[in-house]
Image (spheres, rainbow, N blue to C red):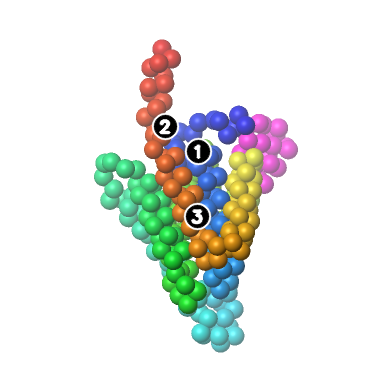
Amino acid sequence: MNLLRKRASQTSESVWLAMVLACSGGLMDAYSFLGRDKVFANAQTGNLLLLGVNISTGAWQNVPHYLCPIVGFAAGCAIAHEIRLHKGRGMHWRQIVVAVEAILLVAVSLMPGSVNLVANSLTSLACGMQVQAFRKLHGRPFATTMCIGNLRSGTQAFVSYVHGHRRRDLRTAFLYYLVILTFVCGAILGNFLLGAFSLHAIMASSLFLLVAFALMFEDREHERPAEQTQAR
């Protein structure tokens, strides 16, 4: 628990925010795959694989189901970066990204199954924005919408701890595995919510994103000087 209470240099790198976003990411992937025609919202490697398989078998009618979310994901990355480049003073650019994500997912929750292609593309757009905006956890590279990089980094840190017995390596491994576990919990929650609320289940991701939005009002970059002054 000491690690969970440890302050990050920025709120966007905090453990609690990472857990909220990872839970939302797992929920989005479960929702799109189980509820929207077996398409991944986050795992574009899976979509690229299925795209290639369908092209190889001549199933051209299925190509848009995988190609459009891939394009949507890339567009989300581009939009988030544009927001960062053009944002002036006021609300933090990451808060704008999270707010746009939440709005997109509310729209998706209202779409019937007949427009799954549009719904999946918008969900992937939101995922791309999140991937682009949140890429560090306590100064370490990580992702909230996919697990392969986190699994690699966490395992590397654990092996380093076994060999060197440095506590920082164990802490790093714990952080990565904690985010992975939270992602899985989000997927489990998504499956249960689909059973209870059908295609409206993605609304839960919007609620998680609103929590993330609220957490980012705590500007830790400006808190530290104040804390140091009080200590003196």
The x and y percentages for residue 133 are 42, 50
Query: From which residue to which does the magenta span run?
Result: 153-172
**To which residue does mark 3 refer?**
205
**To which residue does mark 2 refer?**
220
Work out whether mark 3 precedes mark 1 in sequence or the reverse, and give the earlier one. 1
The x and y percentages for residue 81 are 36, 54
Please indicate, yes or no, whether residue 202 appears anywhere in the rendered image. Answer: yes
Residue extending furthest front? Answer: 196
The x and y percentages for residue 20 are 52, 46
Q: Of discs 3 and 1, which sits in the foreground?
A: 3
The reply to whether dot 2 and dot 1 touch (C-beta < 8 Å) is yes
The reply to whether dot 3 and dot 1 touch (C-beta < 8 Å) is no
Amino acid residing under circle 3: Ser
Q: Which mark is residue 14?
A: 1
Tell me if 18 is positioned left or right of 79 in this view.
right
Q: Quadrant of residue 82?
A: bottom left
For the N terminus, give its image quadrant.
top right
Rounded to the nearest angstrom, the CA distance separating label 3 from label 1 is 19 Å
Amino acid residing under circle 2: Arg
